[in-house]
Amino acid sequence: MRSKLVLLLICAIFSVSAQNTIVPLPEKIETQDGFLVLNRDLPVAIKGKANDQMLQAVDRLKSGLTYRTRITFDKKPVINQPVSSGFMLEAKESSRLIPGMDESYTIMVDTLGVKISAATSVGVLHAVETVLQLVQKNDSVWIIPAVKITDKPMLSYRGLLLDPARRFLSVDALKTTIDAMAAVKLNVLHLHLSDDQGWRIESKRYPSLQIMASDGNYYTQTQISDLVKYASNRGIIIIPEVDIPGHATAILTAKPTLASADTTYVLDRSFGVHKPVLNPAKDETYTFLTNLFREIDSLFPGPYIHIGGDEVEYDNWKNNPEIDAFREQKGLKDFPALQGYFVKRMTDSIKPMGKTVIGWEEVARDGLDKEVIIQCWKSKGLAYSYAKQGLKTILSNGYYLDVFNSLKDHYNNDPLPKDVNFKPDQRQNYLGAEACLWGELVDERILGFRLWPRMAMLADRFWSTEKRDRRSLAAATEAINLQLMEHNLNQVGAPYSILYEIAGSKDIAPLIELRGLVTPVRGYYRHGSGYNNTLTPLNTFADAADTDPANLDLFYNALREFIIAGSSDSNFDLVAGKLFEWEEYYEKNKAYFQQNSRLKELEPLAKNLSATARIANEAMEYIVRGKVPKDIWLANAKKVMEEAKKPVTGVQLTVVDQLEKILIFSKEHDVIVF
């Protein structure tokens, strides 16, 4: 009887937790009776060809099981031999690693073992990650519940852009990111390898590029080959981007004769859009670029090369008579048309290499080759519109992680809305979506913190057709963040190391509390602050601030419930308790913020927190007494709130928006009776 009750309990728990712990959420999950008890004697078998990806799947399965259970799974895999229990991995065929390949898989778990079957070895890799997320503790043993899972991705292209051109990222940092990407079934890593701030890849044909334009920080060809293989073994394509004809300061630092303006070029440490641009009227420009892309093609066996094409400043073209004459000679009516000519020549050079060209949406000019993929970053609608016109597209609009939007904002940006109404032949032109983490405010220490777990939940959005509700999103985010710690991302620890630097001591408790109430200023506010450039260390309070401060969720929920149905004692107590705590915060920590200059910079935040909490407390007094505040009080209260909304050292008191709701409620409330 007890075993039956345990079984029923496990099935009930699994049906609820699967929604929260499996990321991305599979297409179909069917719970079965029973469970597999894990032990170190369970064999791992491969049926069929044991290629590098299959062997990697075995390694990830064994290391993942060991990490989760602390049971050592170290037996060699069984190759093409029958086993009666344990883990069986089967890929029906090999396939070239390319978005659009069959990534589907099925998982069958019963009391004897786990059977994974997939069309390709990449599907097996994905299935292994799902199996690892099924592992759970039952009393004193580790189990995998009996289940049947059938799964495939909604989008064939599920990417992430990183930007080592602006702030260099080591090979180890990229490998760590690749491991985490594989865990959530992302399949494209887009590396932005050149910009105004640096050139990041070794060229044996043009060594002046890395000698003069890299500050010594670049990837050797040996490192690139190793990285490409590392990613491929995990089912991930690496796409190299050399941004042309604009964003070209680094190239022109090494090759000034290719410039549109005759001047001296040095790496630009500042952020923003800069004027240096390649000269499209010189044959030498195309010869150089063709040779360069041939070299890059030999290093990246994947199907794509990205040529950038965004934010081209035309000033240097307009001010160059040679270029203007060239444009008229070619019958190009304006400078966007000249850029279209440039893109066509580069596309014609790259196509014989067997590569498909990708460019940002500015490459979409008249005469664009139908095979060029357009990456839409400014307009979401264009991604769908171009696909309907027969052009291939990728969506990045709404997925710029460096603008510090909340996870909810990104997650609610549906990559494939139902009202798009693609016809079947149009749908195949829309390849998928790619999130971008540009490098202005991201260094290696905080890379994991800025990426995860937000990127994991976007992977969920790109893969699954089912959108999570608010509670499921929060639970899944917390669960996957814990699981990703296996890959040493430092997404939890990095902010605290910054807080220790700011405090100059072990006492960071006041900073931890304050950090939980702020977010980085949304958008590119810090880019234009004057002192930020590629050499500026990222060790400020803003660099430690979270886009989604988790410890406010309980307060927000209680406040929401209090305003909707204020008769709950528990809601009132939680809201009022926090308000009193925050009102006392500044006086309690006044001496703390006087200890050093970096802490003193944060003192206005502490003052604003206490001032707004005091106002909210007074509003609560009006509410519980059934009174409405006078207009003059409301006017003064709003001034305090508006002052507290102003950025301080790159952060905003995000809690102020919530406290303002108490003001509104105090004017419009019904009488609260407890």
Image (cartoon, rainbow, N blue to C red):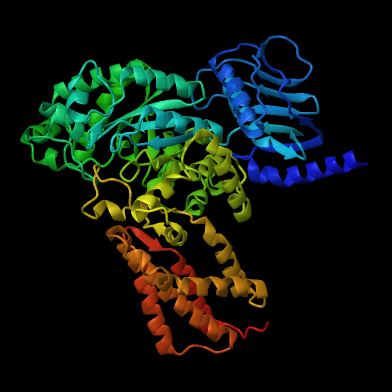
Q: Considering depth in this image, is 63 or 149 the residue closer to the camera?
A: 63
Q: Considering depth in this image, is 467 or 253 the residue closer to the camera?
A: 253
Q: Position of residue 242 (x, y in %)?
A: 29, 29
Q: Considering depth in this image, is 402 or 537 the residue closer to the camera?
A: 537
Q: Does residue 273 appear to the left or right of 15 in the view shown? A: left
Residue 175 figure quarter: top left
Q: Residue at x 43, y 88 (%)?
A: 631
Q: Residue at x 37, y 70 (%)?
A: 590
Q: Residue at x 50, y 30 (%)?
A: 179
Looking at the rendered structure, the number of numbered marks drawn on it comes to 0
Q: Residue at x 38, y 53 (%)?
A: 505
Looking at the rendered image, the quarter that the C terminus falls into is bottom right
Tell which residue pokes out farthest to the right in this image: 1
Note whether residue 203 is visible.
Answer: yes
Residue 650 figure quarter: bottom left
Note whether residue 123 is visible.
Answer: no
Looking at the rendered image, the quarter that the N terminus falls into is top right
Vertical placement of 503 versus 349: above or below? below
Q: Considering depth in this image, is 520 or 385 the residue closer to the camera?
A: 520
Q: Position of residue 95 (x, y in %)?
A: 54, 17
Q: Position of residue 105 (x, y in %)?
A: 65, 27
Vertical placement of 332 versus 77: above or below? below
Q: Position of residue 79 (x, y in %)?
A: 66, 10
Q: Does residue 462 appear to the left or right of 30 in the view shown? A: left
